Amino acid sequence: MGNFWSKKLRGSLLDVVEEALKEDPTDAVELYAELAIVRQTSLDITLMYEAALSDPEKAKALPALGAAVRECMDDIGRMVKLIADLEEKRADKLSVHNIHYVVNQIVRIAHETFGGDEQLGEVFRKAVIDKLKVESKGTTLTPDQDAEAMDATVPAAPTTP
């Protein structure tokens, strides 16, 4: 959590926010469950509208139910567009939020596992460099390979005779 909020929030709200920040960032912006709830609500309202069409006693509810059906359909359209936009934006990308989440987890695990043992910490650091895979557009590279690939694109300095 940012420094500002960690200083301002207290008690149960701070606990709720800190707990939410432990979630995988991809799940935090996952809107499919919310879309399913809106669709189910829309279906329920549509079924009530359908029942009102065939029952003269319920006909007086038609204007309100019709407006509710239209509103739900608009909500579904907006959510589908939002989900499509998010999916397009995060395709083949690692967000800063995702990287931050992974790094925080690695640091926490290392601290819990190794405490102040510098030798074990160094072994862990080397293992992360050697084994952590960063997927990028269909390729799997370790961080050191990625850096080596970037270094290879830098032209060599001219040599003087």
Image: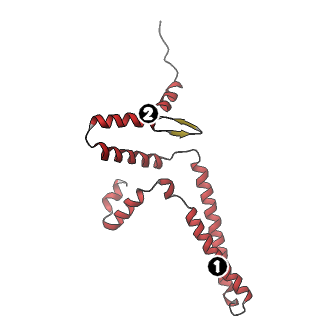
Q: Is residue 153 left or right of residue 104?
A: right
Q: Earlier in the sequence, mark 2 or mark 1?
A: 1
Tell me which amino acid carries mark 2. Answer: Asp
Q: Is residue 21 above or below residue 40?
A: above
Q: Is residue 44 left or right of residue 110?
A: right
Q: Which residue is mark 1?
A: 45
Between 67 and 48, the residue placed more toward the observer is: 48
Where residue 26 sits in the image (x, y, percent)? 51, 54
Where residue 25 sits in the image (x, y, percent)? 47, 54
Q: Is residue 24 left or right of residue 93?
A: left
Q: Which residue is mark 2?
A: 130
Tell me which amino acid carries mark 1. Answer: Ile
Of badges 2 and 1, the one in the foreground is 2
Name the element at disc 2: helix
Picture quadrant of residue 8: bottom left
What's the distance in space between the residues labelled 2 and 1, CA to CA? 55 Å
Between 81 and 26, the residue placed more toward the observer is: 26
Q: Is residue 68 above or below residue 120?
A: below
Q: Residue at x 36, y 66 (%)?
A: 13
Q: Residue at x 28, y 34 (%)?
A: 119
| Residue 28: mark | none
Q: How many marks?
A: 2
